[in-house]
Image (tube, rainbow, N blue to C red):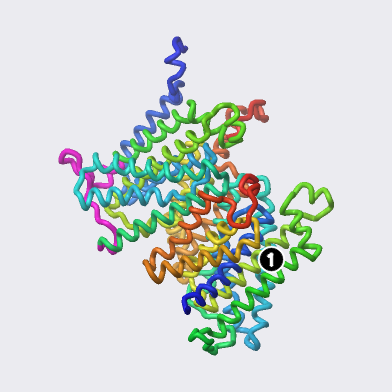
Amino acid sequence: MQLLLSVFIMTCVYSVLASGFVTIYKASRVLNFAFADMALVVGYLTATFIRSVGGPVVIPFIFSFFCSFILGLLIYRLLIRPMVGESLLATTISTVALGIILNAVAVLAWKADIQTITLGWDDYYTLPGNLRISGTEIIVVLFTAVLFVLLGLFYRFSIIGRQMRATAENFLLSSQRGIDIHLITGVAWGIGTFVTGAAGILVGAIAGVSLNIGGVIIKALAVALVGGLGSLRGVIPAAFIIALSERLVNYYINPRLSVTIPFVIMLLVLLIRPWGLCGTEEETERV
Amino acid sequence: MKRSYIEDMVLSAFDTPFRKRCLAAGVAVFILYPIFSPPFFVHISNLVAIACMGAMALNLVSGTAGLLSLGHAGFMCAGAFTVGILGSRFGLPIWMTLPAAAAVGALLGLFSGLPSLRLRGIYVGISTLAIHYIVYYLASEYQFFAGYSQGIRIEDPSVAAFAFSGKKTWHFLLWPFVWLTGLFIANLLRSRPGRAWLAIRDRDIAAKVMGIHVGWYKISAFVVSTVITSVSGALYAYYTNLAAVEEYSFYLTISYLAMIIVGGIGSILGSILGAFLITLVPYGLIYLFGLLRVASYLRDYLYALESGLFGLLIIMFLLIEPLGLAEIWRRIRTFFELWPFKYKPLMITKR
């Protein structure tokens, strides 16, 4: 049962990561291979803020959320917008290169130490059924729930959210209807970066921020694909499937295989049902 | 003057006297370079040769056929480990292990090509990425369980009691391989498969309508590319006497992709230029840092700086000259061809 609980926690982390991925894909049709390094940079930034600002934990978080939003806007303006008409290969490589640069910045600025992020609630609770859960993990679950509810409401009911959905569906038509697609796409990148950074903070809270979290984070790519690259709804079940299979393989078969299993599942999904759990079939054709 | 169909079809790259003189100069450089330069430079030239082979293969599948392939390091790893296992464990000689590495590469290419029949664009790339991780896992499991903590040690290969052990010997072995690969790919590109790949890259539905067997050509693009990549990985393993799984990480794939993007997508010249530039960047940086006597604190983080500059270089090329160094070369050449006229001819070959 403890296994299921850790699966549940990992599901939450993976779904936050993958939703950042999906947001950016919906907005710009670009696979953001830099998300692992974005999360790294924001995680380190948060750790620095916590140490230098102090006080209640919420304040450094607000700072780092703000910074990651600005970072997303900057990345969109400087990198993605000039590359609008280029081929798919070129844009993918540019995000990979961005990831390399962010990684180098993280190493140069924070000397690649392991830093911890404390969420300020360090107690351990024992739930009925002999499960142990820590305060940090409770915060993770609550944060994921709140984030998804907020994102869903934002996309459904707010004006910018509606405009974002329109831009994602048909770029040309929405620009002709008067939507400022540059602003909207920039905001989408900002939200995507903010969510990815938040996931980086969560991972840092559970495991500590270091250069190794890239290996954990890269599985979010598999999660986003299994759930369907264009849909936020598919992210949670996909995250659950991947986290469950990973933990089961880790426990029963072979710890090293557990790193590869998300990719095997991703390959199987690509071969059998390429548009994922909740994507639409047109997504795969609309390259 | 061409007097028969055969003469028309022959790949004539050295027809004018100027080109013949360039060929002679090239052969002279090839023969004299290892004799007159220090061993470290010969080592670098060998690394560049292997990078050229891999870059040409990747350019074939991703540049000419348009199928994004992110599994390049996995294919090289497969070739290297085939050679390591067969050469070291079973003691087979090189003229058996290289074809075996090619066969393993072909199988992997067949398997990697299958998702491309159904998917397009970024999804093909992701499926090849998954294959890369699977190959990496299998290789690391073998390395772990067979007890080679640092990689399989491979002896220098020998053919009929002649051992390829020095850097100079490898120089004379590798560059002819590069030349043969370039010739093979150039020939493929100007014949039916090459035209089919170009058609598939531009609009595969239209190609299918026109009667091109899209599935066959997609898989054959992958198979040809992975065979060449496997062989280059096998040669690399033989050259460095080591097959270690840590060298074939995703970062290697990224550097090969950088080679073809910086060099020029879709052209052989682009692959070679890109391979030269990207392989020489780390060494150039070290030399530059030594020259400028940079602050010692920066020198500790040389690797991070180097990779940061590497990423920056890729992005600058993508933003400023997306068609790469080959395009810059074409522009220079056109400028001198047209001089004193300024404007490009009406028929602009944009590739």
* Residue B163 on the magenta segment: yes
* Residue A101 on the magenta segment: no
What residue is rendered at 58% in x and 79% in y? A48
Where's the C terminus of chain B, which quadrant?
top right
Q: Is residue B98 shown left or right of residue A19?
A: left
Whether residue B263 can be seen here: no
Q: Name, please, the residue furthest toward the top.
A: B3
Spot occupied by residue A24 in the image (x, y as percentages of width and height): 65, 59
Spot occupied by residue A215 in the image (x, y as percentages of width and height): 47, 66
Identify whether A130 is placed above or below A201.
below
- Range of the magenta residues? B147-171
Q: Amino acid at mark 1?
A: Ile
Q: Name, please, the residue furthest toward the front.
A: A129
Spot occupied by residue A39 in the image (x, y as percentages of width and height): 57, 68
The residue at which mark 1 appears reads as A191
What residue is rendered at 41% in x and 46% in y? B51
Q: Name, please, the residue furthest toward the right.
A: A178
What residue is rendered at 41% in x and 51% in y? B74
Q: Residues within 10 Å of mark 1 (few under 14, many from 20)?
A: many
Whether residue A213 can be seen here: yes
Q: Nearer the viewer, residue A7 or A29?
A: A7
Identify whether A110 is placed above or below B177.
below
Identify whether B212 is placed above or below A172.
above
Q: Nearer the viewer, residue A222 or B39?
A: A222
Q: Name, please, the residue furthest toward the left.
A: B161
Spot occupied by residue A194 in the image (x, y as percentages of width and height): 65, 68
Q: Secondary structure at mark 1?
A: helix
When asked about the image quadrant of residue A117, the answer is: bottom right
Number of numbered discs visible in the structure rendering: 1
